[in-house]
Image: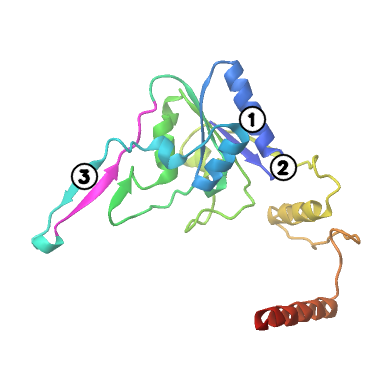
Amino acid sequence: MYVKRICWYWKTTLIKGIIEYLEAKDKSYILMAPTGRAAKVLRDKTGHGITIHKGIYNFKKLESINEESKDDAEHSFHYHFPINNIGEYEHIIIVDEASMVSNVESKHELFTFGTNYLLNDLLTFAQISSGKNKIIFVGDPAQLPPVNDSRSLALDREFFEIELNLQVSEVELTEVVRQENNLILENATTIRSLLFQEKKSELLFKYDDLTFVKVKWKHLLKHLQILFLVRKLEMAL
């Protein structure tokens, strides 16, 4: 298994490069993302991409669980979508936006996906413990973790090595190339680097007269007041 930790830049280019390499080697691969929007971005950029749910769950094999109740009025059905069978061939699974992959139990009144633990189900689908398939997690560990989760386990090396006893390789891209003269990105990278420091140092930004301008509070307040007045006039008209 390989965990890929990537900042904002060059991510799509890298994924496309991995796909081209796998195709040249005649390797089977599956490109996934945790949300429909992220999957669409992948398709637009690479020509491939499905949601994790569509990839790992079997929607054709819908199982109905009859929930018995003494009261006929409360007699109901619960539907279960089992984990798909990946097949016998070796696969490379690439998961983009991996920081959003949750491993918190997801409960729903009407249906259940696998075990309701998305990351666990993904690993079960990939048959990682057999060593036949590999997963490449692509994402930014500085992004917010999944909803109702305290950390992004898909980008947590210790989770795989200590808790799951799996072998992991990790690569992190840190150098800005495409927008190396962009002060907004440079200052954002400064903030990002500070997040991973055990001892937080002083946060110092770089400024210019065009993209990242240093503004005094009184000037900012005056600007906001003008915008507010213009907005009120527009609403009145």
Distance from Cα at disc 3 to Cα at disc 1? 40 Å
Magenta stretch, residue numbers: 75-86
Residue 87, percent across and down? 38, 23
The residue type indicated by label 2 comes to Tyr
User: In this view, which residue lies farthest toward the top?
Assistant: 25
Instruction: State yes or no: discs 2 and 3 in contact (Cβ < 8 Å).
Output: no
Q: Provide the residue designation for mark 3.
A: 64
Q: Provide the residue designation for mark 2.
A: 9
Taking the spot 60% from the left edge, 32% from the top edge, the residue there is 46
From this viewpoint, is residue 156 visible? no
Q: For residue 91, which numbered disc appears in the image?
A: none
The answer to which image quadrant residue 187 occupies is bottom right
**Mark in the foreground, 1 or 2:** 1
Q: Secondary structure at mark 2?
A: loop
User: In this view, which residue lies farthest toward the right?
Assistant: 209
Distance from Cα at disc 1 to Cα at disc 2? 13 Å
